[in-house]
Image: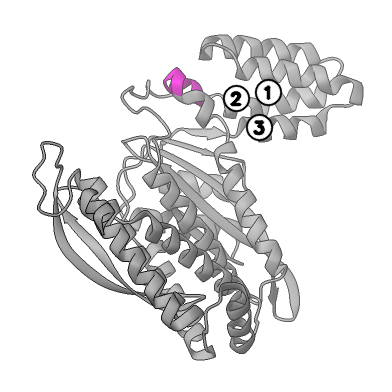
Amino acid sequence: MTRIQDSNPNEQRNATALDDVVELLAEHGFGGMAQAIEILMNEAMKLERNEALGAGPYERTVERRGYANGFKDKNVKSRLGELNLRIPQARGVEFYPSTLERGERSERALKLAVAEMYVQGVSTRKVAAITKELCGLDVNSSQVSRAARQLDEELEAWRNRPLTEHPYLILDARYEKIRHAGSVVSCAVLIAIGVNDLGKRSVLGVSVSLSEAEVHWREFLASLQDRGLHGVKFIVSDDHKGLKAAREARFTGVPWQRCQFHLMQNAMAYVPKMSMRKQVAADIRSVFNAPDRNEAERLLKQTIAKYAGSAPKLAEWIETNVHEGLAVFMLPAAHRRLLRTTNMLERVNKEIKRRTRVATLFPNEASALRLISAVLVEISEEWETGKRYLNMQTEILGTV
């Protein structure tokens, strides 16, 4: 007891908590593990709050940044059983226990896992068994069905949330296989990414449909505007079928940047000899890397003239298409590198592909939309809470 009396209050509380844990385990063996973990976690969260506040309970100190504000009960399921936790609250400072933040991220991941199995048509009984095996949670089939319904509601609310001003809009499309009328067909997945006036990225929307390309794009862009998207000054995308007409109808007069990476890839189809590819790529790249629009136009004319004799079809294609990749020169120099291609969506599509290849074949459009939406919510949340993507203090230079 002398050691405890001589130590500071935090150490006394730690020692008391440990004594309680030892006593529990001595009396109940491993049967008392859940309660023991409760004690340790509750004590750890209180200590973490003290650290965030800069002071312990009733302690007067110049380092104090806020005040304790009671506790909030929360039941958490674990491998050891249900834990009855008391979450410390605070005022005057932002605080949430880091242990629970990690737990909630895992909970979201579990929702995605359930969604993936649900998408594949796995019976709720099998899902419950898998969840028990993987997570140590005893979940019955009705709970899985309820979780799936709740997930659908959450995703629907996210897809229809209000939007604000986004000067930059990046559009992309990918395709997933679904079963339709007894056949396997490609289903278009349209994704919109925005950069707001603070320079933060977010996923603005997603749509999955078998409809005609232009109709689908037009309806998708209209839905973004209906939800409040405005202030778009610059659009980046590849040359997707149907997008041009839809974009011109819904965002009339907004400058469009065709993805330079895809332009380079498309050009290679018109190079008559393999031995010419490296030089053609270098010439087009020099156009894209020019310091300003005037120099880019000069290099473009030079490149067209260079191949007019040896590769006339290539020269014609360059003259018709490459200028669509030069709109980016209207932007501040610091923005050009990040907005001259749709490469910012590479990680997004990679993550979607990683998840959807598990399903291999979706039973319908709704099931594809469910899983893809869940992935995009996670990515968008990460972007919105992370560092800004662009410094928006500089202004767009003007029209092309």
The kind of residue tagged 1 is Glu
On residue 323, which mark appears? 2
Task: Find residue 394 and report its image quarter.
Answer: top left
The correct choice, above or below, for 79 with respect to 336 in the image is below
Secondary structure mostly taken by the magenta-highlighted segment of the chain: helix
Side (left or right) of 15 relative to 185:
left
The correct choice, above or below, for 267 with respect to 64 in the image is above
Q: Which residue is mark 3?
A: 261
Boundaries of the magenta span: 328-334
- Quarter occupied by the C terminus: top left
Q: Are marks 2 and 1 in contact (CB under 8 Å)?
A: yes
**Mark 3 burial class by Cα count in 10 Å: few <14, some 14-19, many 20+:** some
Q: Which of disc 3 and disc 2 is earlier in sequence? A: 3
Q: Which residue is mark 1?
A: 319
Q: Secondary structure at mark 1?
A: helix
- Quarter occupied by the N terminus: bottom left
Side (left or right) of 282 relative to 72:
right
**Residues at marks 2 and 1, CA–CA distance in whole angstroms:** 7 Å
Q: Is residue 143 magenta?
A: no
**Mark 2 burial class by Cα count in 10 Å: few <14, some 14-19, many 20+:** some
The kind of residue tagged 3 is Phe
**Mark 1 burial class by Cα count in 10 Å: few <14, some 14-19, many 20+:** some
Side (left or right) of 34 relative to 14:
right
Q: Determine the residue positioned at 39% across, 37% down.
A: 387
Observer-nearest of 337 and 140: 140
The kind of residue tagged 2 is His
Q: Secondary structure at mark 2?
A: helix
Does residue 53 appear anywhere in the picture?
yes
